Structures are given as C-alpha cells and as structure tokens.
Image: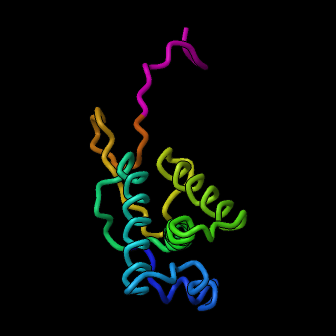
C-alpha cells in the first residue's frame, strides 16, 4: 500500500478518519485498511500503463493520492461524501493520469523503463538518430 492509517491521521487528523469510517462496521481498522488497499490497486491501474509493477519502493508522491482515494472510498460507502473529498479524489486521479502519460514523474525513486524499438538499449525514454549532413561550411 502507498499509505497507512497513520498517514491519514497525520494529514487530516483522527476526527476526520472517524467521520468518514462507517459506524456500522464491525472492524473500523479493517475497513480503513481495505480502502487503502483499494486505493493502492486503483493507483496501480494508472501506473501499469507506464511502469512495471510492483514498484521498487514507495514513491512519496503517491502517498497523498492514496489517502485521498481511500477517503473517497470510505466516505462514498456511507453517504459522508463531501465536495471537498470529491475534489481531492478528482485531483488525485488527475495527477495519476499525468503520471501514467509521462507528464509527471514519481520523484527521486523514478523507475526506468526500456524503450521498445530502441537500438542503443537506453532507458531514458528518448532515442535520436539523424542522417549525415549534406550542406554546411566548407563543403562544396
């Protein structure tokens, strides 16, 4: 998982977590863990378009989207969904879309991926070739 219950509490507080956790659940901690697992699976769905999974390590940039998606899952399950939680979910999925498109990276723990069709075996994601110059200074 990309986040923990302690991460949610550290960012939003224990009261927030209690508010969005269904009261009729026998094991509230289990419900939270399941929501975090669901959020991590959703994140992996986005990342699988660009990266080999599982990732080596847990990039810190994925912690907040995991928390916001898990909060959305918990709040949506028992009508505690607010505009704020929905906005955070929308922002989290927008970030994940940018990551899967390659417009945003995962930070310092950025895994490299080989480029299909690259003759040089580079892992940078770019491979350039050019024809020899035909015209230039000193050429007739």
Residue toward you, 113 or 71: 71
**Residue 65 horizontal side relative to residue 46, left or right:** right
Task: Confirm whether the magenta stretch covers residue 79.
Answer: no
Chief secondary structure of the magenta portion: loop
Task: Please identify the quarter of the rendering in which residue 26 is found.
Answer: bottom left
Quadrant for the C terminus in the image: top right
Q: Residue at x 56, y 55 (%)?
A: 93
Q: Residue at x 45, y 71 (%)?
A: 59
Residue 122 drawn at (x, y percent)? 33, 46
Task: Confirm whether the magenta stretch covers residue 136.
Answer: yes
Q: Residue at x 51, y 78 (%)?
A: 22
Residue 49 drawn at (x, y percent)? 38, 45
Residue 66 drawn at (x, y percent)? 49, 69
| Range of residues picked out in magenta | 128-140
Residue toward you, 139 or 15: 15
**Residue 119 horizontal side relative to residue 136, left or right:** left
Determine the residue located farthest toward the top in the rendered image. Answer: 140
**Residue 89 horizontal side relative to residue 133, left or right:** right
**Residue 28 horizontal side relative to residue 53, left or right:** right
């Amino acid at each position: 998982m990309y986040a923990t219950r302690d991460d949610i509490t550290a960012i939003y507080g224990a009261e927030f977590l209690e508010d969005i956790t269904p009261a009729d659940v026998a094991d509230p901690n289990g419900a939270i863990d399941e929501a975090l697992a669901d959020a991590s699976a959703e994140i992996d769905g986005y990342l699988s378009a660009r990266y080999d999974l599982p990732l080596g390590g847990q990039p810190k940039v994925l912690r907040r989207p995991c928390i916001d998606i898990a909060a959305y899952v918990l709040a949506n399950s028992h009508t505690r969904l607010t505009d704020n939680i929905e906005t955070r979910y929308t922002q989290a999925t927008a970030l994940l879309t940018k990551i899967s498109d390659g417009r945003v990276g995962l930070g310092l723990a950025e895994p490299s991926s080989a480029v299909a069709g690259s003759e040089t075996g580079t892992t940078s994601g770019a491979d350039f070739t050019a024809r020899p110059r035909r015209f230039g200074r000193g050429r007739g």
